Image (cartoon, rainbow, N blue to C red):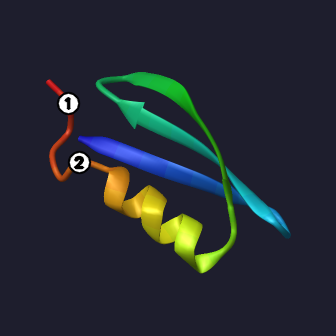
Amino acid sequence: MRIIALDGHRSFAQMAVLEKGVIRDAGKVDLERSRLLHFAKSLSQVAEA
């Protein structure tokens, strides 16, 4: 299972991913619709093996 967390601020969200018991920093994304959609499309549909 993979869990993606977004800590939302006014202009950006800080991201983290929990997968296989390991948390990794996934960086920041600007809170603009086009950038959020780009981030969402970059996610694979299946958790990495």
Q: Cα distance, mark 2 to mark 1?
A: 8 Å
Using the rendered view, name the quadrant where residue 37 is placed. Answer: bottom left
Which of the 4 image quadrants contains residue 35?
bottom right
Residue positioned 32% across, 50% down in the render: 43
Proximity of marks 2 and 1: CB atoms separated by less than 8 Å: yes
Residue 42 percent coordinates (x, y): 35, 51
Q: Residue furthest right?
A: 10
Task: Please give the name of the residue rendered at 85% of the width and 70% of the height, measured from the top-left corner.
Answer: 10
Neighbourhood count class around disc 1 (C-alpha, 10 Å): few under 14, some 14–19, many 20 upward: few
Going by the image, does 10 lie left or right of 15? Answer: right
Query: In the rendered picture of this protein, how many numbered marks are placed on residues?
Result: 2
**Residue 41 position in % (x across, y down):** 33, 61
Q: Amino acid at mark 1?
A: Glu
- Residue in the foreground of this view, choosing between 29 and 20: 29
The residue that disc 2 covers is 44
SS assignment at label 1: loop
The amino acid pointed to by label 2 is Ser
Quadrant of the drawing holding the C terminus: top left
Q: Is residue 28 left or right of residue 2?
A: right
Mark seen at residue 48: 1
